[in-house]
Amino acid sequence: MTVWRIAARAHAALDGEGACLYGSRWTPRGKRAVFAAATLSLAALERFVHTDPDLEPDDLVAVEIQLPPDAGIEHIETSRLPARWRAYPAPAALVSLGERWLRGGTTLALAVPSAVIPRERNFVLNPAHLAFARIEVVGSEPFTFDPRMWK
């Protein structure tokens, strides 16, 4: 399965450092996790909603990631989530859900609905899972947003 990530070149490594330092909708601070999206376009939208145009780095890259074919993926359906799961800041229940999943270590990936487009999927990858070492970075290429998006 191919997933995508957009990051500044300096932060494109699949080390989980950003999630560890800052936490996320799905993971607590202090826990490593890598975030990716099912498509490059969703990765771009996810990046865009978390971006201030004045702070966006000039060296973004789109990273194509291949998950091992036998990697386990746990799917979270919106029906399992609190009514306000898309709120910002996110409900603490989402962080708890992700933390339990990371601690359990049973699957490489957690497929979660995107708060931007709930019918589409983001993936939380667990760097502590044994299959993580078999993830392949297929390639990366420079990425820029269309300037019309900043209007």
Image: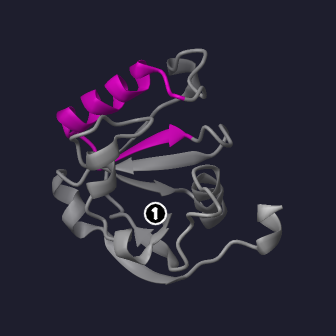
Mark 1 crowd level (few <14, some 14–19, many ≥20, 10 Å Cα): few
Left or right of 21? Residue 110 is right
The residue at the point 57 percent across, 29 percent down is 88
Left or right of 126? Residue 147 is right
**Element on which disc 1 rests:** loop
Q: Is residue 108 magenta?
A: yes
Q: Position of residue 16 (x, y in %)?
A: 28, 56
Colouring scheme, one of rainbow, by chain, secondary structure, one colour = one colour
Q: Residue furthest top?
A: 83
Q: Nearer the viewer, residue 133 or 26?
A: 26
The residue at the point 24 percent across, 68 percent down is 134
Q: Residue furthest front?
A: 54
> In which quarter of the view is residue 34 placed?
bottom left
Number of numbered labels in the structure image: 1
Q: Position of residue 24 (x, y in %)?
A: 40, 40
The residue at the point 57 percent across, 20 percent down is 79
Q: Position of residue 84 (x, y in %)?
A: 60, 18
Label 1, on which residue? Answer: 1
The residue at the point 37 percent across, 28 percent down is 95
> In which quarter of the view is residue 96 placed?
top left
Left or right of 98? Residue 116 is right
**What amino acid is found at the position of numbered circle 1 in the picture?**
Met
Part of the protein shown in magenta: 89-113
Q: Position of residue 82 (x, y in %)?
A: 53, 16
Q: Quadrant of the C terminus?
A: bottom right
Q: Nearer the viewer, residue 34 or 120?
A: 34
